[in-house]
Image (spheres, helix red, strand yellow):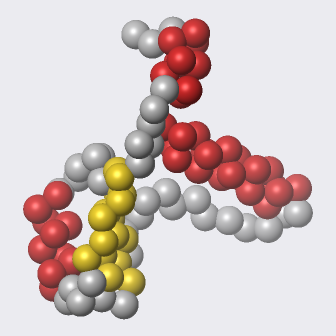
Amino acid sequence: MVLFSDLSELLQAEDPEERFSLSRVSWEGYEALLNQLRDSLQYRVSYLDGVIELLSPSCRHERNKTMIGSLLECYFQEKEIPYYPLGSTTFR
């Protein structure tokens, strides 16, 4: 179990974020990679115009992502703008 004081130290520790890109990858190659990774929570995979990016997010990345998402959610609710939080949903 992680205590609040331990969490603070953890977030301040060296927290590397790993990124790796591959270019000239076909859609079929992208789908094959997704099948190999299955539901792995270790990597986030994105594909655009033949480029695959694998990201192993750091605690800092996740914290910032959550804070930005919370701010946007408050804004959308205040302005009564419909929004659809889909997380890391994959669209094919």
Is residue 12 toward the left or the right of residue 45 in the image?
right
Q: Is residue 32 visible?
A: yes
- State left or right for residue 77 relative to residue 51: right
Please name the residue shown 35% across and 60% down the image. 19
Residue 46 in the image: above or below residue 77: below
* Horizontal arrangement in the rendering, residue 69 relative to residue 53 (left or right): right
Question: 26 and 90: which one is in front?
Answer: 26
Instruction: Report if residue 92 is visible in the image.
Output: no
- Residue 66's place in the image compared with 84, above or below, is above
Residue that extends furthest to the right in the rendered view of this protein: 79
Q: Which quadrant is the N terminus positioned in? A: top left
Who's the residue at 49% across and 57% down the image?
87
x 52%, y 47%: residue? 61
Marks counted in the figure total: 0
- State the image coordinates of residue 80 (x, y, percent, origin top left): 84, 63
The percent position of residue 28, horizontal first and vertical second, equals: 16, 85
Name the residue nearer the viewer: 77 or 67: 67
For the C terminus, give its image quadrant.
Answer: bottom left
Q: Where is residue 7 in the image (x, y as percent from the top left)?
A: 53, 18
Whether residue 25 is situated above or below residue 86 in the rendered picture? below
Residue at 88% across, 63% down? 79
Q: Where is residue 66 in the image (x, y as percent from the top left)?
A: 61, 45
Farthest front residue in view: 14
